[in-house]
Image (cartoon, grey):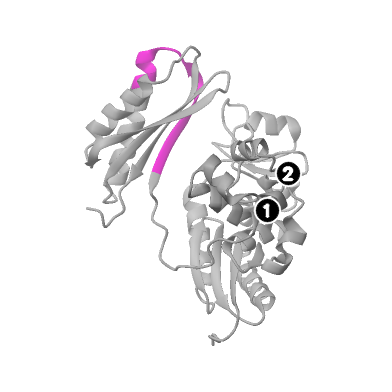
């Protein structure tokens, strides 16, 4: 039974090397070998990237997002496998159902991670029970981070990987995180870090001590104070069981042959926008914005966005707006990647 008087904790459950682990379960002879999952599994084909690498492959420097060809050079003995989305979705669903058998609130964050809201005097004991049941019933292992906020729990998981348990609290946050760079915080990337550096802020402790008004001037009245909240290890601690409703959907293609003609590029953007709109409309959603992503042969990458005149279920205005957005790019190099993203109304806004 749940003790309503017990302390509230957030547990972040992160499945270890998830895609690779699912593949090893299907092919036990691969256990202990370097495994790479990505694309169609053929590293000789250009412009395919690593989706997940097993820990054995990571020891050779193979990382997610790396071209398969590069991974093959770093680790010639790697076993390359094609991505199998249905298998990963099924394995993920099984784990999430197991988590719901515990006296916790489960908020799913993705195929391989979820946060649990629990009231317990022994969060480590709960974490061990979760790990034991997941490995016993699925064969998959997981790391569990424990915190008083979602940020603390997710950050703690980084210290727990692979397969361990770690805890961060308000009392231990600054001693553990204060000396680390701001990029150690989930939600702060290199671009934001550069802007913080311009303000003389490089570490988590410096962000926590920063002048709130100055942050608001530099980043806006909402984002600025929120960044400081991250530095303090604060933020959301409420775990909700409702499934997360996607506010956007995207589709992108890396081409084996660079696109060089304006007509060919426009045709591809139109195709992606049409396919994407038809997919989300089939789910009962309406499109409000459309974005186009372009990456040239030199790896110069930009994304531009435009709002539709009104939300729609019709692919034609989405395509038309996507092509208008495309015209805002000054393309002087062949294009290696195109992507389209649509922003959606919430389901109840119809």
Circle 2 residue: 58
- The dominant secondary structure in magenta is strand
Tag in front: 2 or 1: 1
Q: Which of disc 1 and disc 2 is earlier in sequence?
A: 2
Q: Residue drawn 55% across and 22% down?
A: 300
Q: Quadrant of residue 155?
A: bottom right
Q: Residue drawn 42% across and 58% down?
A: 244
Taking the image as shown, residue 246 lies to the left or right of residue 222, namely left
Q: Measured from the top left, where is residue 256 in percent x and y?
A: 51, 22
Q: Nearer the viewer, residue 162 or 94?
A: 162
Q: Which mark is residue 345?
A: none
Q: Residue drawn 54% across and 36% down?
A: 40
Q: Is residue 190 magenta?
A: no
**What is the CA distance from the residue labelled 2 to the residue labelled 1?**
36 Å
Q: Measured from the top left, where is residue 117 in percent x and y?
A: 54, 72
Alpha-carbon neighbours of circle 2 within 10 Å: few (<14), some, or many (≥20)? some
Residue 140 in sight from this viewpoint: no
Circle 1 residue: 209
SS assignment at label 2: helix
Q: Is residue 260 magenta?
A: yes
125 is higher (above) or lower (below) than 343: below
What residue range appears in magenta?
249-266
């Amino acid at each position: 039974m749940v003790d309503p008087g017990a302390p509230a904790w957030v547990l972040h459950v992160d499945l270890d090397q998830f895609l690779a682990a699912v593949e090893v379960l299907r092919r036990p002879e691969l256990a202990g070998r370097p495994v790479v999952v990505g694309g169609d599994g053929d590293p000789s084909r250009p412009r395919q990237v690593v989706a997940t690498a097993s820990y054995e492959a990571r020891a050779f420097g193979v990382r997610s997002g790396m071209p398969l060809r590069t991974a093959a050079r770093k680790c010639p003995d790697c076993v390359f496998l094609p991505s199998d989305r249905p298998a990963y979705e099924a394995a993920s669903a099984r784990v999430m159902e197991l988590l719901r058998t515990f006296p916790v609130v489960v908020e799913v964050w993705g195929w391989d991670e979820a946060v649990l809201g629990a009231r317990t005097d022994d969060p480590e004991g709960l974490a061990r029970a979760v790990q034991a049941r997941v490995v016993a019933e699925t064969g998959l292992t997981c790391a569990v981070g424990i915190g008083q906020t979602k940020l603390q729990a997710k950050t703690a998981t980084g210290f727990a990987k692979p397969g361990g348990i770690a805890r961060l609290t308000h009392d231990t946050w600054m001693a553990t995180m204060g000396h680390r760079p701001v990029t150690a915080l989930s939600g702060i990337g290199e671009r934001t870090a550069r802007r913080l550096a311009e303000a003389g802020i490089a570490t988590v402790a410096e962000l926590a001590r920063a002048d709130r008004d100055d942050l608001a001037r530099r980043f806006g009245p909402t984002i600025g104070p929120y960044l400081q909240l991250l530095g303090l290890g604060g933020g959301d601690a409420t775990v909700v069981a409702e499934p997360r409703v996607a506010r956007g959907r995207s589709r992108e293609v890396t081409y084996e042959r660079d696109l060089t003609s304006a007509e060919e590029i426009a045709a591809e953007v139109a195709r992606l926008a049409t396919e994407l709109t038809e997919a989300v409309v089939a789910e009962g959603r309406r499109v409000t914005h459309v974005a186009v992503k372009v990456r040239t042969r030199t790896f110069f990458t930009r994304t531009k966005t435009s709002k539709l005149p009104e939300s729609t279920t019709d692919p034609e205005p989405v395509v038309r707006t996507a092509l208008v957005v495309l015209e805002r790019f000054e393309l002087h190099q062949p294009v290696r990647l195109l992507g389209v993203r649509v922003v959606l109304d919430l389901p109840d806004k119809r």
